[in-house]
Image (cartoon, rainbow, N blue to C red):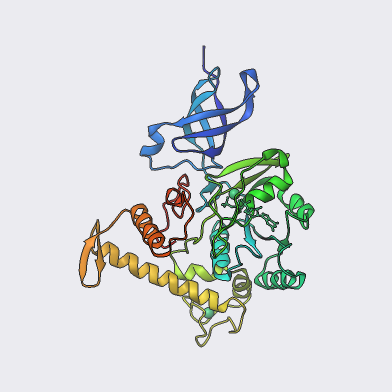
């Protein structure tokens, strides 16, 4: 008997297997298969991401198992959280608990903009600050070029507007720091999901990395929403010249007028088309400085050879970033003694994410 072919979409990726939602149900109305990855994919250097379209082989319908045979070409990719074939990126920032950090928010917006897909900004926990403060933030975000929605899962404010936005066909990814209420939002829109949510805690009212992997959920016909693990410090693009185009307020101006020099970094040099005094100017400059700093460090690192790093005038072995993170955390614990029991198991990052941990986090 010829084995029936099947194709589908990766809706969740765990340590070394993934769930694939089938394009059309198989025997026994099977809609999902638990799949392993063939080594071929590994050797070609391709990593499967949540959101990928795949073809399956070696299907065992009775056991509900198969293997991913082919990874179909991607239309778009969000680097972190790693999600493929994204139609929209929805950046979630809390208006309070944790306090809204404009630099962190900007970094999230930049990663989202780097996909080339439409980006939306939603502001959670609108029940906590004074209404005037909520409106102030919305106005500020509008000046950046976004149409923000302030919402609260506690009062229901803004939820109808969000339901409508998230019900547009395609895949929308919720991303943002831990504890801002991404999973709470999905629960509010679809209570039967019963996603785990976690308290924010500590002096900085940080989240506890409750969601551990990206997962896609249907929210309306043809509309999927991805919940994702929160993290603190999204990476910046590696090309300084690309940075400005990830700021919608600059992109708009640069489309209308260009600077005298094509490699202008828009820092108030003569002939620059960007007039100084714009709201995110300091944030742009901070990102530019961080990016150049990271590039310089990277250069130094690669010139010292593999496995070594420069420390003052000495070269020393480079630690695996995960080990370094762990030991840093331990030092902090010893210094402050204010961590919760079990924190040492959590680290700063979710362990099941595809992307490598950011050592700067
Ligand atoms: N006051 C208030 N608290 C909220 C609201 N939405 C969520 N919370 C609380 O915020 C905390 C964190 O919520 P989660 O949904 O787990 O946050 P998350 O963004 O999914 O966090 P990670 O999974 O760790 O990335 C929980 O204690 C929620 O009850 C809101 O609208 N208002
Ligand atoms: Mg969550
Ligand atoms: Zn310029």
What percent of the width, then of the height, locates residue 197?
62, 48
One can see residue 246 in this view: no
One can see residue 22 in this view: yes
Q: Residue furthest left?
A: 314
In the image, what residue occupies the spot 47% across and 63% down? 237
Q: Residue furthest top?
A: 1
Q: Is residue 204 left or right of residue 293?
A: right
Name which quarter of the figure residue 190 lies in: top right
Q: From what the image shows, is residue 252 above or below residue 333?
A: below
In the image, what residue occupies the spot 53% across and 74% down? 284
What percent of the width, then of the height, locates residue 174?
62, 52
Between 278 and 334, the residue placed more toward the observer is: 334
Q: Is residue 166 left or right of residue 75?
A: right
Between 289 and 169, the residue placed more toward the observer is: 289
Q: From what the image shows, is residue 282 above or below residue 169?
A: below
Could you tell me how many numbered marks the image carries?
A: 0
Q: Is residue 49 left or right of residue 148?
A: left
- Which image quarter holds the C terminus? bottom left
Q: From what the image shows, is residue 225 above or below residue 254?
A: above
What percent of the width, then of the height, locates residue 118?
64, 57
What percent of the width, then of the height, locates residue 272?
54, 83
């Amino acid at each position: 008997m010829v084995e029936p072919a099947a194709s589908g979409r990766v809706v969740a990726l765990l340590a070394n297997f993934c769930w694939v939602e089938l394009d059309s149900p198989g025997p026994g109305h099977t809609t999902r298969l638990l799949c392993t990855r063939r080594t071929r994919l590994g050797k070609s250097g391709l990593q499967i991401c949540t959101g990928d379209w795949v073809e399956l082989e070696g299907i065992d319908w009775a056991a509900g198992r198969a293997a991913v045979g082919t990874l179909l070409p991607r239309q778009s990719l969000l680097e972190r959280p790693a999600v493929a074939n994204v139609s929209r990126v929805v950046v979630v920032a809390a208006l309070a608990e944790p306090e809204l950090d404009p630099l962190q928010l900007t970094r999230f917006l930049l990663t989202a903009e780097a996909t080339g897909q439409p980006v939306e900004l939603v502001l959670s926990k609108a029940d906590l600050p004074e209404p005037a403060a909520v409106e102030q933030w919305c106005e500020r975000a509008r000046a950046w070029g976004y149409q923000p929605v302030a919402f609260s899962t506690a009062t229901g404010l803004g939820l109808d507007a969000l339901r409508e936005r998230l019900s547009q066909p395609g895949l929308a990814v919720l991303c943002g720091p831990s504890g801002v209420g991404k999973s709470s939002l999905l629960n509010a829109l679809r209570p039967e999901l019963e996603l785990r949510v976690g308290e924010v805690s500590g002096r900085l009212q940080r989240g506890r990395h409750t969601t551990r992997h990206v997962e896609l959920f249907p929210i309306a016909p043809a509309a999927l929403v991805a919940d994702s693990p929160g993290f603190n410090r999204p990476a910046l693009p590696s090309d300084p010249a690309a940075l400005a185009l990830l700021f919608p307020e600059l992109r708009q101006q640069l489309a209308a007028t260009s600077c005298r020099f094509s490699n202008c970094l828009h820092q108030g040099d003569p002939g620059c088309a960007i007039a100084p005094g714009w709201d995110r100017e300091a944030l742009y400059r901070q990102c530019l400085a961080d990016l150049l700093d990271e590039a310089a460090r990277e250069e130094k690192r690669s010139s010292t050879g593999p496995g070594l790093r420069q420390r003052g005038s000495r070269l020393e072995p480079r630690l695996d970033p995960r080990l370094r993170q762990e030991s840093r955390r331990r030092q902090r614990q010893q210094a402050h003694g204010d961590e919760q029991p079990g924190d040492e198991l959590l680290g700063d990052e979710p362990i099941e994410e595809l992307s490598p941990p950011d050592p700067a986090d």
